[in-house]
Amino acid sequence: MEQFLNLISKEMESAFEAAGYDSALGRVTVSNRPDLCEYQCNGAMAGAKRYRKAPFMIADDVAKALTEKNDGAGSNVFSKVEVVKPGFLNLDVKESFLQSYLREMSADERLGMPLPEKPEKIIIDYGGPNVAKPLHVGHLRSAVIGESVKRIARFHGEDVIGDIHLGDWGLQMGLVITELKKRMPDLPYFDPDFPGDYPREAPFTVSELEEIYPFASAKSKKDPEYYAEAMDNTRRLQEGERGLYALWQKIVGVSVADMKRNYENLDVSFDLWNGEASVHPVIPGMVRDMKESGCAHESQGALVIDVSEETDSKEIPPCIVLKSDGASLYTTTDLATIKERVEKYDPDRIIYITDKRQELHFTQVFRAARKAGLIGPETELVHIGFGTMNGKDGKPFKTREGGVMRLETLIADIDAEMLSKISTNPDIPAEEAQETSRRVALAALKYGDLSNQASKDYIFDIEKFTSFEGDTGPYILYTIVRMRSILQRYLAEEGATAPAELAPGVPASDVEKKLMMDLAGFNAMMEGAYADLAPHRVCAYIYQVSNDFNSFYHSTRILTEKDREQKESWIALLCLTERVLSRCIDVLGFSAPERM
């Protein structure tokens, strides 16, 4: 289906052309004065200088062309065309035109959202946790935003791959291995002459790993010998020493199992669980090619690629590919990952979702990748940099003790807060209350994050996010649950017609028409959310739809309406609204319970 606003604009464009003006002037926009009209066209103002004519005269000509359409019957699209000096065209849409659009939308499985002729191949790089460390609140935004961007792109019809991109290589692994050797020196992984198979079970738990890494990291900063040993273990691991590599596999396995559990609690999933280690074999050949092509050169012992451009407003330092000691960095593995992704998947776009403080890093990496020929001009590289989740004090969110809060603790806290609210409903059994509170808490958490523009910092306020009133996830879910309750009661009526067999009618009130126009804007909103990779646009839309539905609900006695045709029209509208909201919350990454 074509976007509703495009259809309206086509009607106006034909009127401009019929009046003797450029059809491009007929672009229609949503009115910035809804108290005066529903839509507006300012094309007459733009055309005044070009046609050397007063704008209200151009607008008059266009309005006349619309009234003379269809042998004088007027426009099939507009019920009102009003010229307002100095030359604005104020427009209202015909109820019959709106009705026909929503009927077509109701009959479409995708709610009028067309599929692209040729789907894009997209890789989304999000998550990015480090192995041997617990997921903390700093991992929330990448996971939540990345999951929603992935779902929005998939609903748009694109071929999308989500990759977690683990931090599973480098010095951090050497540190963990070093400390494990200090604590458990008799493990077979440290015996270079061990001949047999290594144990199937890991000799440590995820909790032990989470204590070991910060201990080893702190010790390496104070003890030069310990640091040197960790560096040596890192080198031996990266050179493929059998025992250390087997131990590394156990570290990764235990960590990933814990990560999967945490991400599952967020309803976040990845198609690929690759990490920096997966591209380690790619690096030597990539570096050799960079040297031979001349795009990389030595500077103070390091291998670098100059990435500054004449148009830069600030200095962009060279991209360091190898340090002076020959060690690789994040930039090295990121470049190798781009090379591998291009060779394996030939993507149209690679989207990275990280903290916005990494903007310089990705500028360097993207430019270096193009300069080194790792990626062609036909592939787009995109970085979505997100802001910080802050506490009420405006500083990065911490525990009460001042430490970094674990992600599972944050989820547990918001689950508990929501359970205390859901449990006040005596009609919901305890087991159902647990599942309902988990769903609503997830909506509170995700909507609280996603309703903010990704690049902006925001305040994490558990009381606000879990409220059933205002711009919150629970309010959206409560609205959907209300609709489902009405539909269930309608279906329980004797002789009720299945909602799928019904179609929206002509709006009977202004509040009903407002809701219908909201729904008609669904596919334009989703197109915009995909084009801008902006989940917050979906949030703003469903908040508006929810508000307008609740206004409609409070002013309309749906189930007690005596006129059967009118009741069925309202049920069809309610059903369409529920489908639209359910689709929207699905792309945001949460779902509604049956009752609350």
Image (cartoon, grey):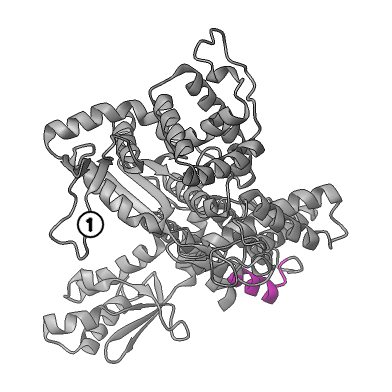
Q: Amino acid at mark 1?
A: Ile
Q: Pointer 1: what residue?
A: 316
In the image, residue 162 above or below residue 363: above
Res 275 visible = no
**SS for callout 1:** loop
Magenta residues?
Answer: 547-558
Q: Position of residue 420 (x, y in %)?
A: 80, 61
In the image, residue 540 above or below residue 123: below
Q: Position of residue 155 (x, y in %)?
A: 46, 47
Identify the residue shown where x is 40% and y is 54%: 530
Q: Quadrant of the C terminus?
A: bottom right
Q: Position of residue 481 (x, y in %)?
A: 70, 58
User: On the image, which quarter does residue 315 sit in?
Assistant: bottom left
Q: Magenta span has 490?
A: no
Relative to residue 453, is residue 376 drawn left or right? left
Relative to residue 247, is residue 122 drawn left or right? left
Q: Magenta span has 553?
A: yes
Q: Residues within 10 Å of mark 1 (few under 14, many from 20)?
A: some
